[in-house]
Image (cartoon, rainbow, N blue to C red):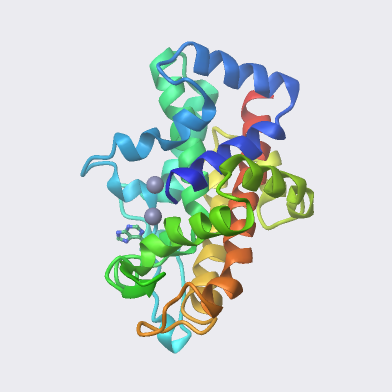
Amino acid sequence: WGADGHQAVATIAYNYLTPKAKSGVDKIINNSDFTSIEDASTWPDRAKTSATGGWHYIDGEDSPLNGQCSLSLSRDCPDTGCVVSAIADAANTLKTGSDATNLAHALAYLVHFVGDAAQPLHASGYSKGGNGVTVKFSGASKNLHSVWDSAILLKTISSKYSGSHDKWVSALIASATQYNTAAGVACASSTDPTNSDAVETCVMKWATESNQLVCSTVYKSGFSQSTDLSGAYYKSVAPVVDAQVTKAGVRLAAMLNKILG
Ligand code: ADE
Ligand code: ZN
Ligand code: ZN
């Protein structure tokens, strides 16, 4: 996601923290260079290097134009890491670490990558997660990945919430309880954060759901490279973008409550 998506995931999660987990987050932020959990949420993009770039996604083996999407941890997460293993590493460091900077970076990575795991195209290997797919949106040429990272939710904020990011996030928070039973919330609440295999199994539920959305929604819904996607396609997929951002917030809160609560 772009900054609006990551900051929204952070705000939604913070809203659902237990008092103890909230104090834990506040203490880590106060002992760091970050000004807020929202500021921390976007740091992994500012700090991206060739070594950490692969931690933002997992490339499924997809032919979405033929309706074929599949994801496998052993096949698709390389030894250099992917979004699933990066979440497990961050959860473990957040639970067991002691150095203030390490804890702040682990928190930032966890907030950021739980968000990325819910972006369907961050779980798709087809054309580098859509980065290689040229489309039209509001009269401009864009790649499909950037449409899903930013353009759709920016259009929602401008057209439905008079340009207010905060009003959009408030509406997502008001709708969030319906996602308490979404895939992977229960395991996020119950999995030992130091058991990396178990955390990866839990996170694979979210990534698999994202990968399935690539076939069921991203390359459907009237998708075409020649039609402007800000019309009927936007109307069809905008609720899915809101739902994915909200689910990421609820899942992140469940993990943080388990780790810091
Ligand atoms: N680069 C390669 N695959 C990608 C993906 N699924 N998302 C973002 N960047 C990528
Ligand atoms: Zn992206
Ligand atoms: Zn990212």
Residue 195 in the image: state x and y as whole percent: 55, 38
Residue at the image position 29 percent from the left and 42 percent from the top: 52
Q: Nearer the viewer, residue 186 or 129?
A: 129
Q: Vertical placement of 95 versus 249: above or below?
A: above
Residue 142 in the image: state x and y as whole percent: 32, 67
Q: Nearer the viewer, residue 137 or 42?
A: 137
Q: Nearer the viewer, residue 222 or 89?
A: 222
Ligand 1: quadrant of the figure: bottom left
Residue 84 shown left or right of residue 239 in the figure: left
Q: Vertical placement of 87 versus 151: above or below?
A: above
Residue 44 in the image: state x and y as whole percent: 37, 37
Residue at the image position 55 percent from the left and 79 percent from the top: 232
Res 221 quadrant in image? bottom right
Q: Vertical placement of 184 versus 238: above or below?
A: above
Residue 117 shows up from this direction:
yes
Residue at the image position 74 percent from the left and 26 percent from the top: 18
Quadrant placement of the C terminus: top right
Residue 243 in the image: state x and y as whole percent: 64, 58
Residue at the image position 60 percent from the left and 75 percent from the top: 236
